[in-house]
Amino acid sequence: MKKLVLSAALGALALTPAALAEDHEIQMLNVGSDGQPMVFEPAYLEIAPGDTVTFVNAQGAHNAQTVDGMIPEGGEGFRGGMRQDVSFTPTEEGVWGIKCMPHYGAGMVALIKVGDGEAPNLEAASEVRHPGRARTRFADLFEQAEADQGETSEEAR
């Protein structure tokens, strides 16, 4: 009987990380809640490794895919189909750049920070060049990520 109880307890502990994983949604929109055209909403998200992010095609002809050079080391990019929802579950800590391919130049981009600590690829990812409005939107998103990273560093002290 003790072996059965111990086995059940160990089994429950093994499942804990998966049970604690969260699901997040990012909407793909023609017009955001702030009136801005061609957006992911939210455009910035902080998650834990193992959480799942689903990009929901709420309006229009959109897709979600990773941006070359904006994936943490060891991470695997993804490319969702047009007009389709797509989910991914990153396990590597760092920042992940996301774009809607047909609206990339119009600024339809998002940034996902995975993990609580400093993002190891933050500097390299922030140096990637982008077309049109994507450049200014990513600059704003990186400011947000750097501010959040600063808050995390202060909390650790």
Image (spheres, grey):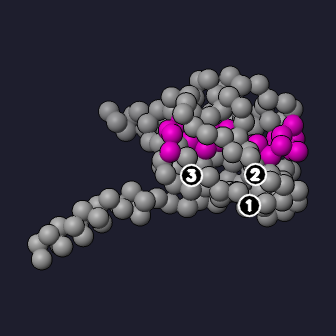
Residue at image coords 68%, 22%: 127
Magenta region: which residues? 91-113
Q: SS at mark 1? A: loop
Q: Which mark is residue 80?
A: 2
Q: Amino acid at mark 2?
A: Gly
Residue at image coords 88%, 60%: 60
The residue labelled by disc 1 is 85
The residue labelled by disc 3 is 89
Snapshot quadrant of residue 136: top right
Q: SS at mark 3? A: loop
User: What is the residue that sits farthest to the left in this orientation?
Assistant: 2
Left or right, residue 98 beside residue 31: left
**What's the CA distance linking mark 3 and mark 1?**
14 Å
Snapshot quadrant of residue 15: bottom left
Q: Is residue 28 above or below residue 106?
A: below
- Choose the circle earlier in sequence order: 1 or 2: 2
- In the rendered image, residue 126, in percent from the top left (x then y), is placed at 65, 27
Residue at image coords 24%, 62%: 10
- Can residue 152 be spotted in the picture? yes
Snapshot quadrant of residue 84: bottom right
Q: Amino acid at mark 1?
A: Asp
- In the rendered image, residue 45, in percent from the top left (x then y), is placed at 60, 48
